[in-house]
Image (cartoon, rainbow, N blue to C red):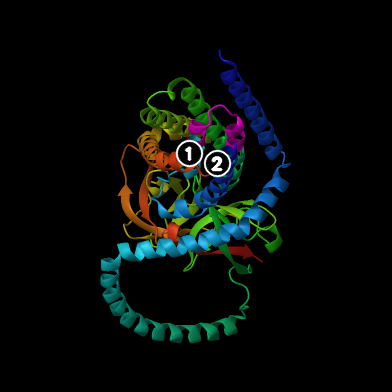
């Protein structure tokens, strides 16, 4: 139980630090449209490690709320996209993560990031679907980069969150 | 279906309903106070993170462009010499201008057509975290006289965006590179009217130019002054590539911006007096 509590505290601390990094440092450091979503990677890692709890949905809701305030579009797309990604991730985790953890974590996070991006693109361009078709190549590239970034990030994050901090 | 999965589906649907509720609360303006407080608490931490971020970004940028900097240094020295002569000429023109202003009794305070512009400096406290929008958050808001539609300018009179949402002590700027941004513009020498639009792929584009208008590569794109709060003459970039075809109704052109928005630290907001 102590381990669980400490893990939760580490998760909350990391979530706040990552949130601030996501709205300041990360967009400035990376290429124009290829910004990794470190907060999403953290949420996916936590979801993979503790799949029984629904608390991760509330954490995703809170995170999406903050990110939605900072993102420029109308209110809502980021919360819904993050919630969709977490839903896809926990659904797949339930059925596939019991065996071959590392390999399945890779596939599950890729699907979750895909769900996040597809929902986001759909919701942001809901009033102008023409934008989706005219920028399809650009969107595909963004999704590929996001998947790569997230998959690279998710393994060290899973390691940090799963470390035994107290005996 | 398992109970565990059922609980998750119920939680997911419950949260989606809450989001729908928040969406409508936001539409009727009832979420503004929550946004205000979030921005208020995030502002000091955001500013600190942004400062460190600027320093780290500067460090990497310097490392990356050390060769370019050497070349640029040589070019700048040459330009400096030329500009020295130009400054002398401009000083003469300034004196002449003062005399002429006195002669026609033109007030020094009236900037253009009797309208004065006050420039307010702002710090960036946050950036759009998503890949699909280009917005920044600044530390000036309603309490500082900021209103929707006011232009945001980088040093040198380079337009980078306009205010789209105002809170008590902070506001949100939509950058000209955002795919939903469009600003009335004009080319400096050929005076062709058009609209500068943001694009996911290319940054910014000059569009809606009549086939009869002439476009020249390298020509400066400036604001036309047709928009209420955006003064005429703010620079947006220069034409790099012209796309014209007899089959199309309008011409378009790619624009090279003079400012790397990622490296902008201070922003000036133009407030018309």
Query: In this view of the protein, can residue A122 be seen by the observer?
Result: no
Residue A64 in the image: state x and y as whole percent. Answer: 58, 39
Chain under disc 1: A
Horizontal relation, residue B204 to residue A69: left or right: left
Identify residue for label 2.
A7
> Vertically, is A152 above or below B190?
above
Instruction: Give the number of the disc on residue A25.
Output: none
Residue B17 in the image: state x and y as whole percent. Answer: 66, 27
Whether tag 2 and tag 1 are in contact, CB under 8 A, the answer is: yes
Q: Look at 53% across and 59% down and name the residue there.
A: B49
Q: Which residues are magenta?
A: A45-61
Q: Look at 63% across and 76% down and name the residue there.
A: B109
Circle 2 SS class: helix
Chain under disc 2: A
> Vertically, is A142 above or below B146?
above
Horizontal relation, residue A4 to residue A152: left or right: right
Residue B82 in the image: state x and y as whole percent. Answer: 32, 81
Q: CA distance from mark 2 to mark 1?
A: 7 Å
> Vertically, is B250 above or below B69?
above
Does the magenta portion include B10? no
Does the magenta portion include A58? yes
In front of the other: B129 or B272: B129
Screen quadrant of the C terminus of chain B? bottom right
| Residue A63 picture quarter | top right
Identify residue for label 1.
A162
Circle 1 SS class: helix
> Vertically, is A34 above or below B227?
above
Screen quadrant of the N terminus of chain B? top right
In front of the other: B34 or B71: B34
Instruction: Identify the mark nearer the N-term, 2 or 1.
Output: 2
Residues behind callouts 2 and 1 on a single chain: yes
């Amino acid at each position: 139980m102590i381990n669980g509590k400490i893990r939760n505290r580490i998760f909350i601390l990391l979530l706040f630090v990552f949130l601030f990094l996501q709205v300041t440092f990360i967009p400035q450091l990376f290429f124009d449209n290829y910004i990794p979503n470190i907060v999403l990677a953290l949420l996916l890692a936590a979801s993979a490690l503790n799949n029984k709890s629904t608390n991760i949905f509330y954490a995703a809701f809170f995170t999406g709320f903050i990110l939605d305030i900072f993102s420029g579009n109308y209110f809502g797309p980021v919360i819904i996209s993050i919630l969709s990604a977490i839903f896809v991730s926990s659904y797949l985790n339930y059925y596939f993560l019991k065996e071959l953890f590392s390999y399945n974590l890779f596939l599950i996070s890729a699907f979750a990031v895909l769900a996040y991006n597809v929902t986001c693109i759909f919701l942001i361009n809901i009033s102008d679907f023409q934008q989706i078709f005219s920028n399809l190549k650009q969107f595909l590239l963004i999704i590929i980069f996001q998947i790569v970034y997230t998959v690279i990030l998710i393994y060290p994050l899973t390691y940090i969150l799963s470390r035994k901090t107290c005996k | 279906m398992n109970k565990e999965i059922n609980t998750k589906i119920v939680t997911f649907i419950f949260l989606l309903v809450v989001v729908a509720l928040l969406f409508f609360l936001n539409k009727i303006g009832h979420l503004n106070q929550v946004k205000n407080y979030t921005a208020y608490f995030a502002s000091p931490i955001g500013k600190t993170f942004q400062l460190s971020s600027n320093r780290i970004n500067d460090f990497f940028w310097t490392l990356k462009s050390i060769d370019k900097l050497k070349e640029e240094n040589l070019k700048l020295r040459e330009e400096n010499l030329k500009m020295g002569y130009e400054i002398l000429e401009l000083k003469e023109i300034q004196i002449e201008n003062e005399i002429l202003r006195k002669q026609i009794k033109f007030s020094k305070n009236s900037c253009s057509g009797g309208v004065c512009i006050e420039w307010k400096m702002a710090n960036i406290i946050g950036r759009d975290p998503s890949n699909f929008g280009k917005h920044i958050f600044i530390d000036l808001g309603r309490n500082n006289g900021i209103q929707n539609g006011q232009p945001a300018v980088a040093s040198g009179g380079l337009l980078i965006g306009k205010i789209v949402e105002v809170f008590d002590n902070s506001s949100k700027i939509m950058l000209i590179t955002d795919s939903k941004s469009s600003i009335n513009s004009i080319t400096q020498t050929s005076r062709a009217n058009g609209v500068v639009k943001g694009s996911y792929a290319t940054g910014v584009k000059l569009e809606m130019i009549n086939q009869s208008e002439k476009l020249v590569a390298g020509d400066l794109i400036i604001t036309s002054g047709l928009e209420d709060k955006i003064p005429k003459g703010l620079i947006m970039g220069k034409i790099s590539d012209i796309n014209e075809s007899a089959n199309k109704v309008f011409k378009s052109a790619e624009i090279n911006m003079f400012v790397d928005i990622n490296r902008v630290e201070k922003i000036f907001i133009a407030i018309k007096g």
